[in-house]
Amino acid sequence: MFNNILHPCKISLVLSLLRRRWTCVVGLIFIFLLCPLEAYSARLTLSWQPSTDPDVAGYRLFCRQNGQTYDYDHPVWEGAGTTCTYEFDAVVNTTYCFVVRAFDAAGNESTDSNEACWTAPAFALEGLSITGPAWVKEGDTASYVATATFSNGDTGEATNTAVWDVEPATYASISRGQLTTWAVPSHQVVTIAASYTFGLVAKEAQKQVTIVEVGADDTDGDGLPDWWESAHGLDPTSASGINGRNGDFDHDGWTNIEEYVNSTDPADDASPAPTPPEVREVNPHHKAGIDDSIRVPANTSFAVRIEDADGIDMTDGASICFTIADGINSVYERDLSDTDVVRVIKLSADPDSRATKLWAVYDRSMEAGYGNYAYDTDVTIKVEAKDSRNDSMTPRSCQFNVETQAQHNQAEANAPETGPLAPADLAVVDPEHTYDAGIKVTDGGLEGAMVVYDSGEPVEPTFGPTEELPPFDAPGMDAVGAPMNLQPPTVFTTPVKILIPCPGVADVSELSVYFFNGEDYILACDGGGQVQPGAAGWMAPGSRVDHPETSPASIELRVYHFTGVQAGLARSSAGMDGDTPEAGAPSGASSGGDGGGCFISTAKDF
Ligand SMILES: [Ca+2]
Ligand SMILES: [Ca+2]
Ligand SMILES: [Ca+2]
Ligand SMILES: [Ca+2]
């Protein structure tokens, strides 16, 4: 029993991730989940040693912003434990302060602990990478650079401030990026790691390095044994040019030392076997508008999703080339250097100018001399790509047929009515004001559907007629509401945010989301928002947000590209408020049952 107030705790901020023991101290670890311009979501774990007072029943944590006072009626956390997690939206350059109070079963509360404060920096550490040689000759040293990337787009070298490590430590040591190797009995692969902490955020990077065993048989000291050089026609007495370690004797993109380490032939450009770029999706694809009834608007873009393990060099304009036969004009070519009309959207976080996963987009509507495609023409676009090792893909020819003028006019007449977004809409779909343009469907079965986007996008997103999409037919699933027909086919430089209304569903977390690839409805994400393998190029990972507070409830996603979307629920589920589809839902999208899916459409998988 307390007769008076408890003794206050002592609180302080731990400004690094070092493990230290404090007496009645609160340690804060901030993890940044998202870093838009003005705020980011911060999650902190607080822990403290228990009070020595035997009657303590628990603790309360209070938070205030600089310039405000504590609200002791509303702790941000309360519990008996000595650790808690507190999530909040941290506004940049704003200071947050915390105190802890202990309380007992009789309701007595201690005075404040001392105050611990933290100011949210204007930007956060987002990544760390290591660059340097992938191999080192035994007994040699090599230098590695650690580069930190920040949420504001800046990069900075962290080589000397990072903590370095090498595993196993049997054959090498590392300090401040300098690797020292010793003699090895045969080639040995070691992993070097750097960790760096900025503003309570820690990142680690790793790189595999091969320590090359050469022995005494290396007259010119280039890391290539005499016997190996002689066997393949290299000069064992010259360490320069194509006869040296970094030379490429057969011009296949692999250096001599890489060929030696990998046991490939330095005099054969087919060894190792080429791994050319692979096309994963095309949008619009060959069937759209040719064999089936999917209309391709005259202002469509043309996009290919490409993957290549070696990476495609973004600084080489010839890396990706489009040859366009538009049915009217002479055939012409555009490549990566034609930046007015060709864009690249990287889907991978690569450490240099090479991209291993990307969308490449040709925006015909941005062509000063041509403008949109002509109505009712067959368009053929040949795609060629080569990677940073000069491995070229077999050219792919893609066709689509452009809408007729009559189809265009009919689509305009039947499109859902839309209007600008109101402030209340933006508060739901874009409270961070990341985007500066948006539209909302104001009537019919899709009422409440929204798209927010960057007004700088070359192609403006619109809603096409719902009837243009085929009936939702994913096995075992029923559609919820009406499908969104998002037009025209394009890939956005900044993924756009869409809000999918799901009428008649109380708990949208039970809904999956589907997109239409021109032939089939493809599962994009499950109820938990997990992106499915077939949707890697369509939906931004981690972007699903459910909005039970809207009317009707809705699902928010960010997507790279467009066409049809609808919400769906497994037939065995029972998440619908009622069993009557909303008025305005197309017959194909409400095939009875008690659920459905959210779906959007476009590209085809290869
Ligand atoms: Ca040599
Ligand atoms: Ca040599
Ligand atoms: Ca080579
Ligand atoms: Ca070779």
Image (cartoon, rainbow, N blue to C red):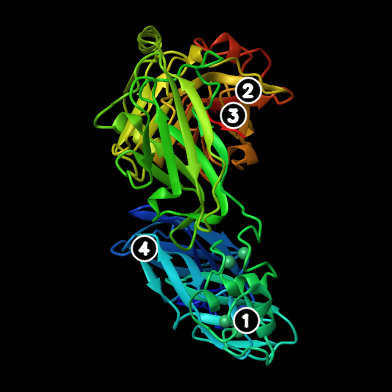
- Mark identifier at residue 172: none
Q: Separation of disc 3 and disc 4 at Cα? A: 35 Å
Quadrant into which the C terminus falls: top right
Asked if the residue at label 1 sits under 8 Å from ligand 1, the reply is yes
Residue behind mark 2: 596
Residue behind mark 3: 514
Q: Separation of disc 4 and disc 2 at Cα? A: 41 Å
Q: Secondary structure at mark 3?
A: strand
Q: Earlier in the sequence, mark 1 or mark 2?
A: 1
State yes or no: discs 1 and 3 in contact (Cβ < 8 Å).
no
- Mark identifier at residue 123: 4
State yes or no: discs 3 and 4 in contact (Cβ < 8 Å).
no
Q: Residues within 10 Å of mark 2 (few under 14, many from 20)?
A: many
Q: Secondary structure at mark 1?
A: loop
State left or right for residue 339 relative to residue 237. left
Specify the amino acid type for callout 3. Answer: Tyr
Q: Separation of disc 2 and disc 3 at Cα? A: 10 Å
State left or right for residue 103 relative to residue 316. right
Q: Residues within 10 Å of mark 4 (few under 14, many from 20)?
A: many
Q: Secondary structure at mark 2?
A: loop
Residue 206 % position (x, y): 58, 71
Rendered view: 233 above or below 154: below
